[in-house]
Image: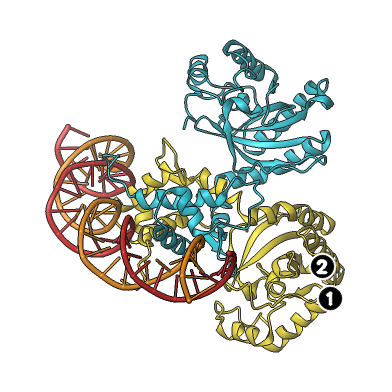
Chain colours: A cyan, B yellow, C orange, D red
Amino acid sequence: MTDKPTVPSAGLRRDIEILEVLAGHGDDRDADGFGVSWIAQRLGREKSQVSRALRALELEGMVERDPITRRYRLGWRLFALAARTQHARLVQVAAPYLRGLATAFDEDAYLCVLRGNLVLTLMSVPSSRVYHRVWEGISVPLLMAAAGRSLVADWDDQRIRELLRATTLPSGLDSAVSGTEEWLADLAHVRSCGYAVTDVELEDSKAGVSAPVRDHRGLITAAISVSVTRTHAAARLDEIGAAVGEAARQLSISLGLVPDGRPVMSPTEGSL
Amino acid sequence: MTDKPTVPSAGLRRDIEILEVLAGHGDDRDADGFGVSWIAQRLGREKSQVSRALRALELEGMVERDPITRRYRLGWRLFALAARTQHARLVQVAAPYLRGLATAFDEDAYLCVLRGNLVLTLMSVPSSRVYHRVWEGISVPLLMAAAGRSLVADWDDQRIRELLRATTLPSGLDSAVSGTEEWLADLAHVRSCGYAVTDVELEDSKAGVSAPVRDHRGLITAAISVSVTRTHAAARLDEIGAAVGEAARQLSISLGLVPDGRPVMSPTEGSL
DNA sequence: AAACTAGGTGCAACTAGCGCAACAGTAGTG
DNA sequence: CACTACTGTTGCGCTAGTTGCACCTAGTTT
């Protein structure tokens, strides 16, 4: 219909839509699953279709059904598959560094990667302070996360300008984001100092510090970031920045980067 | 064809087969992905079919393709979905306990759940000793893992006998597994002492210690286990057992179990 | 008991996707 | 360079799998 090249996407898209609904917001309290009709309505699809699709998904272990409430939730197979992703390996290696940062400053620490123009959080280590929102698996606009600056640090100016031009933020937030020239200056700062400091972070009242993580080829593949409670640590930002930068550097070395100041490869790679 | 009730399973099964192939053995060095033809041959399917399916999967982010080698690997979306699984929450909560055990005894610690008659490892924390095989996402027969005994500790004798009768182990291993009566005695030991000690573990030359983790309803939902190098710790098994049992108890409380000795609900629930 | 809701099923209609075979790239090999 | 040997993509007719409707069953509320 819409696509000229014929790829078997109809069933797949439906299945993934269903999985995405089952994933919910992540922080929802309604984590005890969802019923068939509810999902069908939310997707604007036939009940019967959803019912059958869910049964098939259950057969494959992609979803699980509570035998008494008859509600569906995400299944074990997703976990089993995801554990063998390249991202899983990254998380495995990065975990100690994140924990180190989180305990050293008692602030939330994150590991993020770039997906299109979104920042996907792979792992978060909570501080000891309050109940911690689950950020894993959540994507946020590039401009809203501290990690964003680090992830595009190697892009050339033109590409950055395009990005900033193309991005439209949810209303009311554009004022919080700095202008194009400031961005370019920030990126220069990342390149020279190894870390970025930003005012805007996932939540309000948080500042952010982040640093790029490079793989064995020297390409930026991830970013470590720490969200800093403003009242606590406005003065400490640079101290934390140095620590985040150092952690990112060490993580990069763990990933096979030769600890050398040599120039990186063409940053034009690594797009979507 | 095979199934009388019509569920949309054809495409789904193919997609999951592909994902499973891409997942590889997990510990493989060939983690740089797989080509279309190779996958097609391994699945006994048409190249064209696999090619198109992979493109659809890539469109949805379930797989990623290296732009230069043109090889596919598992994608970010699996990670994003899995992060919002109930298992992810379990791992999040259990992580500190596992790390505590791993560092306290310098042995590998695992978190496992029951899937059918298999033990699925959700998380593993390596000891400091040697290179650590990645067990996350891997399933092993119930009888081969230390966690197995803990996971079925609440089953009644009849169900255990059925399980033991139904299970056929890979040849050469049946001798290492104790007999039916020993098993039943072991389960009684778990119920009274709170932990199980076994001779057989995932790898040779390892003994295993495990303890059941219960959710808020008192049902066994997971197991913590520690694999102990035989030469090192034959005498320490009971000391470690006590620690594992205590960790499992604390984790259960973190999951909402009221720290009470009250009888659990019907153990007949919680099957596949 | 009717009136609701939530989930599942039977079946004809239809279209998505299968499989073949031909095509386009890329790489060795001499 | 053509020659062989790959791997991956695509056009297209035909069939089988999926869809959507209407009709069920089962549980809960009034």
Tag count in the figure?
A: 2
Dividing the picture into quadrants, the one containing residue A52 is bottom left
Residue at (61% x, 22% y) in the render: A172
Tag 1: amino acid: Cys
Q: Pointers 2 and 1 in contact (CB under 8 A)?
A: yes
Q: Residue at x 33, y 50 (%)?
A: A8
Name the quadrant containing residue B264.
bottom right
Does any portion of residue B22 appear in the rendered image? no
Up-down: is B267 above or below A229? below
Is residue A144 among what the camera can see? Answer: yes
Callout 2: helix, strand or loop?
helix
Residue that numbered label 2 is attached to = B245
Between residue D26 and residue A166, name the one nearer to us. Answer: D26
Q: Quarter of the image containing the N terminus of chain A?
A: top left
Q: State the image coordinates of residue B251 (x, y, percent, origin top left).
A: 78, 60
Q: Chain of mark 2?
A: B
Indicate which disc residue B193 carries: 1
Amino acid beneath label 2: Gly
